[in-house]
Each structure stands twice: as structure tokens, then as C-alpha cells.
Image: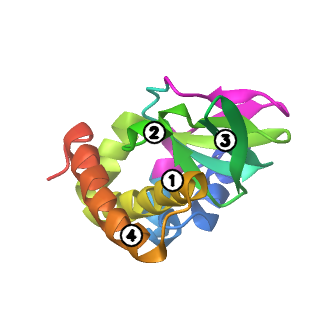
Amino acid sequence: PSTTVSMEEEAHLAALGQTSPFSLLPLQERSRLAASMKTSLFGAGESIFGKDATDKALYLVRSGEVGIAVSSNGSRYETMTLKPGEFFCGLPPMNEVLQSVTYSAKSDTACSLVDQATLESIFLTHPQLAEDLSAALATREMALESERQGRSADFQTRQSAELKQRLLARMRQMFRVH
């Protein structure tokens, strides 16, 4: 029997295919994920979420750009831009100093969202995905911290490894992955 795939599901599937580590999942798993995803659209300049974010969804940037800004000493400055094929989530940063991180659309932006329940399900069958995602998020958080404080490369490497482990522990606890 043939199955009909909506244009939205095709867009989600394409986003998964261009976003590491999801691109490493078998096509059947990516298709299952795509069927459960939702789309969020943001206009240029629109805030996606800020310092009080508790959104447990994972956002895959399909089109447009997402700016990441950090506040320091009363000033806010953009430190990073995410493009299609990159992802972000509403987990608050592990570093309390970075609690002021905000995400906003730099241009009209479309994101595919993977909700908490779907993440839990995929992490159960693909625990390495949780590790890969936590590693990428830890690396990004360290880059934000580095931008903010100008830390040395050796210090960043040690901090990144520790942060990866703490983020992985939080993700395992939050999504019940053991």
C-alpha cells in the first residue's frame, strides 16, 4: 500500500537529512520522526525564546537564520548565527552566567520542532543521539562562554568535556534515557 506524505512532512524529513546527527539515522527512523514534527515560523526580528525558556522541544532550522545573543554588563550582543541544518533547544544553559542567552530570527525563519515525547522515544532506541546532541550543545555553550569571557583553548576543552557530561546526565534524566 502506498502512503501519502504531506509537504510539511517532506520539509521535516529534508531538515532531518541535513541536520547532524539526525542525518545519520536510518531513513525509516527519520520518516517516523518527520511524521510527528511540527513547524514554527518566525518573522525577522521576532524573539524565539529568551532567558526564562523552559521549552523542551528541539528546533531544527529549515530556512532563515537564528541569532544567539548574550547579555553582559547590561549590554546585549549577538555572538552566533545558526543557519539551515543547525539546531537549538530551550534547555537553559548550564552556566548561570549564560542564563541571559536569547534566540531570535534574523530573517524570516522556519523551524521543524521535535517535541519532548518524540525525543524520549528516539533516545530510547538511539541513545547515541542523546550523546551527540549533548556534545553539540556543550560545544556551542562553551563557544558562547568563550565569546563572553575570552577563555583559553585548553580551559575550553576541559570545560567542554565536563559540560557535555552534565548535559548528557540532564538529558538522560529529563528524557528518561539510561
- What element does badge 1 sit on? helix
**Closer to viewer: mark 3 or mark 2:** 2
Q: Residues within 10 Å of mark 3 (few under 14, many from 20)?
A: many
- What element does badge 4 sit on? helix
CA distance separating discs 1 and 2: 8 Å
Whether residue 164 can be seen here: yes
Q: Is residue 53 left or right of residue 131?
A: right
First of labels 3, 2 by sequence position: 3
The three-letter code of the residue at mark 4 reads: Phe
> In the rendering, which numbered label is found on residue 69?
3
Q: Which residues are magenta?
A: 33-52
Is 126 or 156 nearer to us in this picture?
156
- What element does badge 2 sit on? helix
Residue identified by numbered label 4 = 155
CA distance separating discs 3 and 2: 13 Å
> In the rendering, which numbered label is found on residue 145?
1
First of labels 4, 3 by sequence position: 3
Q: Is residue 22 above or below residue 41?
A: below
Is 173 or 53 nearer to us in this picture?
53
The residue under the point 60% across, 65% down is: 17
First of labels 1, 2 by sequence position: 2
The picture places residue 153, in percent across and down from the top left corner, at 47, 75
How many numbered discs?
A: 4
Q: Residues within 10 Å of mark 2 (few under 14, many from 20)?
A: few
Residues under numbered marks 2 and 4 in contact, where contact means CB atoms less than 8 Å apart: no
